[in-house]
Image (spheres, rainbow, N blue to C red):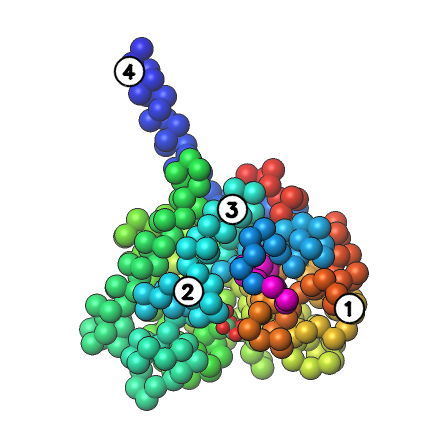
Amino acid sequence: MKKIFSFLAAFAIATNVAASTGSDLLQRLEKLQAKGVMFGHQDDLVYGCSWKWDEGRSDVLETAGDYPAIMGFDLGGLELGWEKNLDGVPFDRMQKEIVAQHERGGIITISWHAYNPTNDENSWFQPAGNAVTSILPGGALQPKYDKWLDKVVAFLAACKDKEGNVVPVIFRPWHEMSGGWFWWGATACTSQEYRQLFQYTHKYMTEKGCDNIVWAFSPNLADKEDVEHYMQFYPGDEYVDLIGIDVYQFSADNKVYQDNLRRELDVVKAVGEKQKKLIALTETGYQNVPDPQWFTQTLLPVVKEYPISYVLLWRNAWDNPKENYVAAPGKPTVKDFKKFCKDKKVLMCKDIKKTR
Ligand code: BMA
């Protein structure tokens, strides 16, 4: 009898562990992709346009009636041993919300605006010299990079649900590399060095036991996007599970934004089909959304044309009134945003929780 019990217990543990792997999440994402486009919002649970750190609040919940299916968080500052990230979000709170989102049936994506390893300045600081090669094997700061990765591994490993399973996440390191603004971007290192950085990160974290990750690769809007340009930084099929693109609207001309989106998503879709990867609009938005019908008239029509897994809108920043990307109580976009979230094709948290 005792033997049977221990066998059953071992089986239960094995199935629980399996339920939190990256490949399980990937399978779930594939099922969900057939149902619609998941709506995502960065930092949704920790602050909004007019509040910060209150528990249980969300600008999306308060305007559209449900939590986003995808919650985005950022690790920038974790590598330096900070208690709060670059936007003031305490890491222990972030872990709590990652687990809460998982337990309510939602999904998590994590970006990393890592500080510059050569001088601990922010991600946008480009020193003379090459920060990427300095942390790759053979570089003077390589051991420092391993320590950074150890912190990321420990952070993710500590995000456990009630059953003790590590929460699976979509991890999107080294994003927007095709632009020239980050120390890992196109003006700071070669595309080969970039690929090495991504590959090294993947290998190191996998060797350290991180099997809870869906790895995402996401360049940014380019003047002239084509498959060749998009693939320039691609680390390789074995390092990537999901591919995406970050595209923002910068002018009042909605058509320019839609054209940009379509141009990019055409390429992402073609690459996704060829490499057999899920695709997503990994970041988008229009600061302070001046057009009250932007969500249903500008964003939605394009999003509906593509088989994307999710669309992630950037943060309703408490610390920068310009950076408000989704509706919030009192904003002129509330009615339209609610309509967007209720669209049959758009999946919110309650729409996905049963698809495991
Ligand atoms: C950027 C901006 C910054 C922010 C960073 C990390 O795109 O929103 O203000 O610090 O993301 O969230």
Residue named by callout 2: 84
Amino acid identity at mark 4: Lys
Q: Secondary structure at mark 4?
A: helix
* Res 322 quadrant in image: bottom right
Residue 100's disc is 3
Q: In front: mark 3 or mark 2?
A: 2
Spatial CA distance of label 2 from label 4 is: 47 Å
What stretch of residues is rendered in magenta?
40-51
Residue 332's disc is 1
Q: Secondary structure at mark 2?
A: loop
Spatial CA distance of label 1 from label 3 is: 30 Å
Q: In front: mark 4 or mark 3?
A: 3
Amino acid identity at mark 1: Pro
Spatial CA distance of label 3 from label 2 is: 19 Å
- At 39% from the left and 38% from the top, the residue drawn is 164
Residue 261 versus residue 280 in the image, above or below: below
Q: In front: mark 1 or mark 4?
A: 1
Of the image marks 2 and 4, the number of the one nearer the N terminus: 4
* Res 153 quadrant in image: bottom left
Amino acid identity at mark 2: Lys
Amino acid identity at mark 3: Ala
Spatial CA distance of label 2 from label 1 is: 32 Å
Q: Position of residue 118 (x, y in %)?
A: 29, 79
